[in-house]
Image: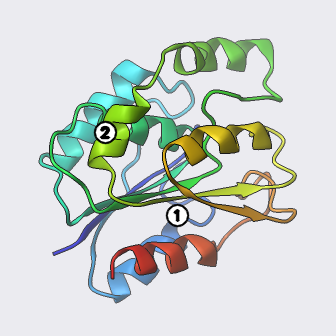
């Protein structure tokens, strides 16, 4: 059975924005869907989030898929560095690596380790069969220069108009059909 792990962004809860919509759509199609509440959502750390995801997934394989939002994309990328088996694929939504903007000093202190710690993109590419990166042309946190990193990963790039950060508070986003459509295409 195909498993999908939806990893929310910073401050994101399973009940926020488009996450519950995507979970419902995927469950209706018979997929095993996991939409966790990440640890300490307002202060996401690599030491907290990456091991949490690894424990949740247990063993990744070709029937394992991920959908990440914002810092959830970073979490997935960093987790995939530790995986040996090839996975089915990833949908990255508003993924920022290495550039993030619009943060205050306190938020930047939380983001700094995520920004400064390199990701082995070659290792990730070996285990990630397919990927799609979805960006918005007016995201206040994720500048489009992040597209380059996802192009290096071989991701299909989609840039949507005026979608903010694909969040309920920055973009008024409660459904994300592009993520569902691309994930279903990926699973064929």
* Res 48 → quadrant: top left
Which residue is depicted at the point 34% across and 76% down?
187
Q: Is residue 48 above or below residue 77?
A: above
Which of the two residues, 74 or 133, is positioned nearer the viewer here?
Answer: 133
Which residue is depicted at the point 51% across and 34% down?
41
The residue under label 2 is: 80
Q: Is residue 168 left or right of residue 78?
A: right
Residue 91 horizontal/vertical position (percent): 49, 59
Residue 68 horizontal/vertical position (percent): 49, 51
- How crowded pointer 1 is (Cα within 10 Å; few <14, some 14-19, many 20+) is rated as many
Quarter of the C terminus within the rendering: bottom left
Residue 50 horizontal/vertical position (percent): 33, 31
Which of the two residues, 174 or 160, is positioned nearer the viewer here?
Answer: 160
Q: Earlier in the sequence, mark 1 or mark 2?
A: 1
Label 1: state its secondary structure: helix
Q: Is residue 169 above or below residue 74?
A: below
Which residue is depicted at the point 79% across and 29% down?
101
Residue 106 horizontal/vertical position (percent): 72, 14
Q: Which numbered marker is on residue 19?
A: 1
Quick check: can you spot residue 156?
yes
Quick check: can you spot residue 39?
no
Which of the two residues, 120 or 51, is positioned nearer the viewer here?
Answer: 120
Which residue is depicted at the point 63% across and 27% down?
98
- How many marks the image carries: the answer is 2
């Amino acid at each position: 059975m195909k498993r999908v792990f939806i990893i929310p962004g910073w401050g994101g809860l399973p009940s926020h924005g488009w996450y519950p919509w995507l979970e419902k759509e995927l469950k209706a199609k018979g997929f095993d869907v996991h939409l966790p509440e990440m640890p300490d959502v307002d202060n996401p750390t690599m030491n907290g989030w990456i091991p949490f995801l690894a424990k949740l997934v247990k063993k990744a394989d070709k029937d394992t898929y991920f959908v990440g939002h914002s810092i959830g994309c970073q979490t997935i990328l960093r987790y995939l560095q530790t995986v040996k088996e090839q996975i089915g694929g990833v949908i990255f939504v508003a993924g920022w690596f290495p550039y993030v903007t619009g943060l205050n000093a306190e938020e930047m202190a939380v983001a700094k380790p995520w920004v400064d710690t390199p990701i082995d993109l070659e290792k990730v590419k070996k285990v990630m069969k397919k990927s799609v990166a979805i960006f918005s042309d007016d995201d206040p946190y994720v500048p489009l220069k992040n597209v380059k990193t996802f192009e290096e990963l071989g991701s299909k790039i989609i840039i949507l108009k005026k979608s903010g950060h694909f969040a309920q508070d920055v973009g008024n986003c409660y459904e994300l059909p592009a993520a569902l459509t691309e994930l279903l295409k990926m699973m064929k």
